[in-house]
Image: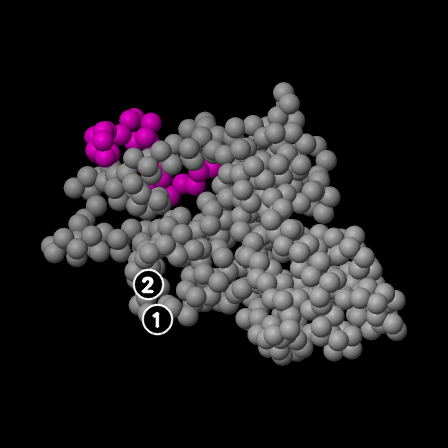
Amino acid sequence: MNTVLAAEVPLRGRERELALIRDVLEHGRREGGAVLAVEGMPGIGKTRLLTEAAALARGLGYLAPRRPHGREGRTSRASATLTGGRTGDGYGRCDQPAGPHLVVVDDLRGAPDRSPHRTRAAGARERSGAGRAVWLIAHRPGEAPPLTGPLLADPAARTERLVLGPLAPAATADLAHDLLGAPPDPALRRLIGDAAGHPRLLIELLTGLQEEGGVRLAGGEAELLAEGLPARLSARVRATLERYSVACRQLLRVAAVLGDEVVYEELALMMRTSVSALLPTLEEVCATGVVRNEDTRAVFQGPLLRRLIAESVPASVRLALEQEAAALRSVRRGQRRGGVPVQPGPLTADCPARGGRLSEQQHTLVALVAEGLTNQQIARRLALSPHTVNYHLRKLFKIYGVSSRIDLLQAARCN
C-alpha cells in the first residue's frame, strides 16, 4: 500500500473554521484590518488550516506570496504575505497597493521580543497601512507567549479567536479513509478511536503503519497487522515533548504512567511536593492541550496520546513508577479509613469484582498486569492480539470503576 502524504489529504471536519476565515477575508476586502488568532494543541491542524486560508485568499483576489509560510524549515520564524495589487518584496511592500493584504504568521517563537507585532511581517503592516492588513496567526499555547501588543489592541481592526478542537467521529472516519484508501477493519477502528480525533496523531499513525507494512487491503477493508505503534508516531510525540520545559515534560510523563485520569493530590505526592507548588507547571501542562481539567483531575485528551507519552519513559522506570504509585495509593486509602494502611493481599480468582467474580481469563489477565507486562507482552503470552488485550482490560476497568492499571491491581486484591 502506498503511503499518502498528509499534504495530499483533503482537509476534513473544518467547515465551520473555514467559514469564519472566509468571513474575515471578506471583511478585509470590504472594510480593512482584521486579526484572526488560530489556537490549539500541537498537531491539531493550525498550519494546515493556514495553508487552506492562503489558498482561499488567492481565490478571493489576494495575490500569491513569493515565499510560503510554514514551519519546519519553511520560513519558520517569519510570515508570508498575500497582497492585493502589485507586489513588492514578498512581505507586503507594494508600489501601488490596490487592496488589503494577508499576513500569515505561523511561528511566533523566533520573534526578537516574542510578540507578533515585532515579527518581520509587522514591517509589511507598517509599510502598507494598519487598516489594510488581515492577519492570520497560529498561536501555540504552552510554546509561545500570549498574544499581546498593539497588533491585537488596534480598535479599528476586527479581532477573532479560533480554538481548534478534535475532529468529530465522522470527519475522523473520512480522514482515515483518505489515508488508507479503504474503510478500516474493527481492530483498526478501535485503534483509530484511541487517537480521539487528533488529526496529526491519526496521520502519523496510519502513514507509519503503511510504511512499516502494518496494514493491508483485504476484502474491501484496511486490515490491521501490526501489534506495536509505528516508530514515526513515537518519534513525533517525543519531539513535541522536547519543546516543553523540563518540569512540564516530567509532569506529563508521570501523569501518563498513572493513567488516563490523574488526581492532582496523587500527582503531587508522586512529585514529592504539594498541589499549590505544582500550580505553575500544571498551568503549562494544561496550556499544551494534552490534558484538560475536570474538577480535581487531569484527564488526557485521548488514550493513544497518553500511551505514547507513557511509553517515552523507559520500561524499567515506568514499572518503578507504577509500583511507587500503588504504594502511595494504598497509604492514602489507609489514612482515609483512619486506621493502619491497608497491605495488599494475594490475587485470587475469587476476588469479587463489583457485581460478580473474576473469570479465569480475567484473573490471568490481572496476574499478567501485576507482573508489569505490556499489552504486547500479554498478547504474546496469551496468543491474542494487543487490541483484544486492550479490549478486555477496558472491560475490567469498567467492572471495577477504575481508569488505570495501578488502580485495577489495587481493586483486584483481597484483604
Residue that mark 1 sits on: 277
Specify which label sits upstream in the sequence, 1 or 2: 2
Would residue 281 be seen by someone viewing this image from the given angle?
yes
Would residue 65 be seen by someone viewing this image from the given angle?
no
The percent coordinates of residue 268 (x first, y second) are 33, 63
Place residue 124 in its image quadrant: bottom right
Residue 144 or 404: which is nearer the viewer? Answer: 144
Above or below, comparing residue 48 to residue 175 in the picture: below
Q: How many marks?
A: 2
Question: Gap in Å between the C-alphas at discs 1 and 2?
Answer: 8 Å
State which quarter of the image contains the N terminus.
top right
Q: How is the image coloured?
A: one colour
Residue at 42% x, 28% y is 382
Seen in the image, is 399 located left or right of residue 19? Answer: left
Residue 409 or 17: which is nearer the viewer? Answer: 17
The percent coordinates of residue 7 (x first, y second) are 72, 47
- Could you say whether the residue bearing mark 1 is in a helix, strand or loop? helix
Residue that mark 2 sits on: 268
Residue at 26% x, 44% y is 410
Residue 361 shown in magenta: yes
The percent coordinates of residue 91 (x first, y second) are 79, 70
Q: Are marks 1 and 2 in contact (CB under 8 Å)?
A: yes
- Label 2 is placed on what type of residue? Ala
- Could you say whether the residue bearing mark 2 is in a helix, strand or loop? helix
State which quarter of the image contains the C terminus.
top left
Above or below, comparing residue 140 to residue 94 in the picture: above
Magenta residues? Answer: 349-377
Specify the label residue 5 is tagged with. none
Residue at 47% x, 46% y is 302
- Label 1 is placed on what type of residue? Ala
Mark 1 burial class by Cα count in 10 Å: few <14, some 14-19, many 20+: few
